[in-house]
Image (cartoon, rainbow, N blue to C red):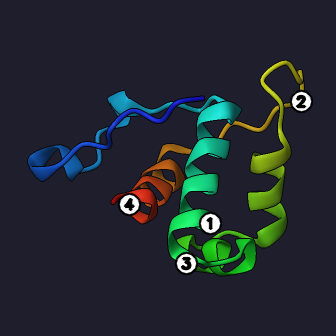
């Protein structure tokens, strides 16, 4: 999934209307963070305040999986901040 440019300026403020709980979006954010920062999944999970297993479940969840785990907006926002260029 192509990651759209992340908002800048005032748009950086949390806005739940931008919630994208789709697993593909979350995977894209995580891949960008891991590649850009050199952090591993444990460091990312610690940074945003979730257990590493939760982060791994978000990453492994498939769009077609009926048990896909929806990421809460607050964590999506935190991942977007870490993924920001």
The mark closer to the camera, 2 or 1, is 1
Q: Earlier in the sequence, mark 1 or mark 4?
A: 1
Which residue: 39% across, 32% down? 4
Q: CA distance from mark 4 to mark 2?
A: 27 Å
Q: Position of residue 38 (x, y in %)?
A: 60, 77
- Disc 1: which residue: 34
* Residue nearer the viewer, 85 or 52: 85
Q: CA distance from mark 1 to mark 3?
A: 13 Å
Q: Is residue 50 above or below residue 56?
A: below
The N terminus lies in quadrant: top right
Q: Is residue 55 left or right of residue 21?
A: right
Q: Residues within 10 Å of mark 1 (few under 14, many from 20)?
A: some
Q: Earlier in the sequence, mark 3 or mark 2?
A: 3
Q: Quadrant of residue 26?
A: top right
Q: Residues within 10 Å of mark 2 (few under 14, many from 20)?
A: few
> Of helix, strand and loop, which one carries label 2?
loop
> Of helix, strand and loop, which one carries label 4?
helix
Q: Is residue 66 left or right of residue 23?
A: right
Which residue: 52% across, 30% down? 2
- Disc 4: which residue: 81
The mark closer to the camera, 3 or 2, is 3
Q: Earlier in the sequence, mark 4 or mark 3?
A: 3
Q: CA distance from mark 1 to mark 4?
A: 13 Å
Q: Is residue 31 left or right of residue 85?
A: right
- Disc 2: which residue: 67
Q: Position of residue 71 (x, y in %)?
A: 63, 43
């Amino acid at each position: 999934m192509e990651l759209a440019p992340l908002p800048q300026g005032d748009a950086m403020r949390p806005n739940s209307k931008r919630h994208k709980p789709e697993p593909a979006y979350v995977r894209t954010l995580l891949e960008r963070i891991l590649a850009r920062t050199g952090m591993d999944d444990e460091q990312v999970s610690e940074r945003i305040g979730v257990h590493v297993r939760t982060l791994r479940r978000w990453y492994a969840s498939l769009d077609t999986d009926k048990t896909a785990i929806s990421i809460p907006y607050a964590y999506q926002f935190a991942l977007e901040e870490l993924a920001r260029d």
